[in-house]
Image (cartoon, rainbow, N blue to C red):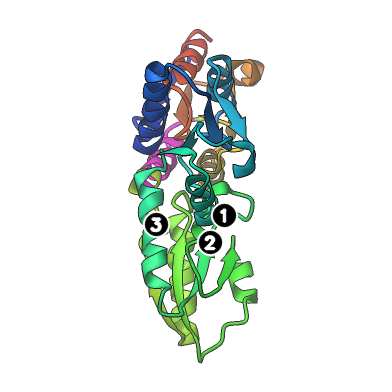
C-alpha cells in the first residue's frame, strides 16, 4: 500500500480564489453583454476550458474587447497602458489582479518615480512580469538568474530599484541583494515575493525529504508550479510534474512506499483530490 502525503498548501492561493470569485460573481449577475478576460485569468487549462464553456471569451489584446463589454483583469495583472486603454474606450473593467501583484505594481511605481531604474528578477515571457515592468517609468532591466544579473552594465552614477516577480525563488533574490551590495551601487530593495509562494516552496522541500517521489500538479504554463518542481529537484528528490491524472507514471510509482503530493496556486482542488485517490489505490 502506497502512503500519500499531501502538502497543506497544495492548490488555490488567495489571489486565485479572489480572481475566480469575481469572475463567477460577474457570470451569475450578468443579464446581458459579453464577458471577456484579457489573457488566461489563471494558468490552468482545465479551469480556462470550463469558463469557455460558460461563455467567457479570452481576448489576446485590449483591442479585441469591444466598447461596453465587461473585461476581467487576470490574476497576474496587465500592463498599465493596457488598462488605461480599456477604460478610455468605455470598457467595464473588473480588476481581479491578485492583491500581492497589485501591491508589487504600486511599490515599483512609488519607488521608481525619482528616476530609479528597475532591476526585476522574473521570467521574460510571464504576463505578471510584463505588467510589473510597465510601472517603472525610468527604465528597466530584467534578469532570471544570477548570471543574467551579472551581465547587466550597472552605472554607479545612477540609482536602482530591485524587485521580484511574486512567485520567484527567495534564495536567488537574496543572492541578488548581496551581489548588488558588493557592487556599491545606490539601490532600494522591495519585498515583493509572496509569502504564500515561499511557504508553498518551503513545505515542498520539507515534504520531499520524507518521501521517495514527489508529484506536482499544475498547468505547464504556471510559473509557480514550475518553480515547485525546480525546488524539489534541487533538494534531490525525484519529481514528476503533471497537469491531469492521465499523465501519472503509475508503473514507476506502484512499487514506492511514500509519495509526496503538492500543487501550484492555480490548480483546482478536485484535480488534486482525484490524483490523490489514484495514488492511494496503487
Position of residue 120 measured from the top left corner of the image (x, y, whole percent): 52, 64
**Looking at the image, is 135 positioned above or below residue 275?**
below
CA separation in Å, label 1 and label 2: 5 Å
Q: How far apart are marks 3 and 1 (CA)?
A: 12 Å
Which residue position is annotated with label 3?
104
Q: Which quadrant holds residue 123?
A: bottom right
Does 236 sit left or right of 191 as displayed?
right
Task: Categorize mark 3 by other alpha carbons within 10 Å: few (<14), some (14-19), many (20+).
Answer: many
In the rendering, which numbered label is found on residue 83? none
Residue 234 pos. (x, y %): 55, 48
| Residue interval drawn in magenta | 198-211
Nearer the observer, 228 or 271: 271
Q: Is mark 2 on a helix, strand or loop?
A: helix
In reply to whether residue 207 is colored magenta, the answer given is yes
Q: Which of 35 and 267 is in front in this view?
A: 35
- Residue 252 x, y percent position in the rendering: 64, 21
Relative depth, front residue between 172 and 130 = 130
The x and y percentages for residue 179 are 49, 76
**Labels 1 & 2 near each other (Cβ < 8 A):** yes
Q: Which mark is residue 133?
A: 2
| CA gap, disc 2 and disc 3 | 10 Å
Q: Evaluate whether residue 281 shows in this view.
A: yes
Label 1 sits on residue: 130
Amino acid at each position: 500500500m502506497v502512503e500519500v502525503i499531501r502538502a497543506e498548501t497544495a492548490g488555490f492561493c488567495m489571489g486565485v480564489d479572489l480572481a475566480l470569485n469575481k469572475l463567477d460573481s460577474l457570470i451569475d449577475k450578468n443579464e446581458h453583454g459579453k464577458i471577456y478576460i484579457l489573457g488566461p485569468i489563471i494558468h490552468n487549462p482545465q479551469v480556462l476550458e470550463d469558463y469557455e464553456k460558460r461563455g467567457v471569451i479570452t481576448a489576446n489584446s485590449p483591442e479585441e474587447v469591444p466598447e461596453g463589454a465587461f473585461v476581467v483583469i487576470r490574476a497576474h495583472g496587465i500592463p498599465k497602458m493596457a488598462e488605461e486603454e480599456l477604460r478610455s474606450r468605455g470598457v467595464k473593467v473588473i480588476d481581479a489582479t491578485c492583491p500581492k501583484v497589485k501591491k508589487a505594481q504600486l511599490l515599483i511605481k512609488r519607488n521608481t518615480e525619482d528616476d530609479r531604474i528597475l532591476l526585476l528578477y522574473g521570467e521574460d515571457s510571464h504576463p505578471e512580469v510584463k505588467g510589473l515592468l510597465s510601472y517603472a517609468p525610468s527604465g528597466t532591466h530584467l534578469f532570471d538568474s544570477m548570471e543574467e544579473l551579472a551581465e547587466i552594465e550597472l552605472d554607479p552614477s545612477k540609482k536602482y530599484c530591485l524587485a521580484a516577480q511574486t512567485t520567484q525563488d527567495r534564495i536567488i533574490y537574496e543572492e541578488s541583494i548581496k551581489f548588488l551590495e558588493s557592487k556599491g551601487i545606490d539601490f532600494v530593495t522591495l519585498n515583493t515575493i509572496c509569502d504564500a509562494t515561499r511557504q508553498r516552496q518551503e513545505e515542498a522541500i520539507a515534504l520531499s525529504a520524507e518521501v521517495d517521489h514527489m508529484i506536482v500538479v499544475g498547468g505547464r504554463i504556471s510559473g509557480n508550479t514550475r518553480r515547485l518542481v525546480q525546488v524539489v529537484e534541487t533538494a534531490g528528490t525525484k519529481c514528476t510534474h503533471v497537469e491531469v491524472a492521465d499523465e501519472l507514471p503509475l508503473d514507476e510509482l506502484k512499487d514506492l512506499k511514500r509519495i509526496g503530493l503538492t500543487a501550484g496556486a492555480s490548480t483546482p482542488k478536485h484535480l488534486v483530490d482525484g490524483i490523490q485517490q489514484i495514488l492511494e489505490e496503487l
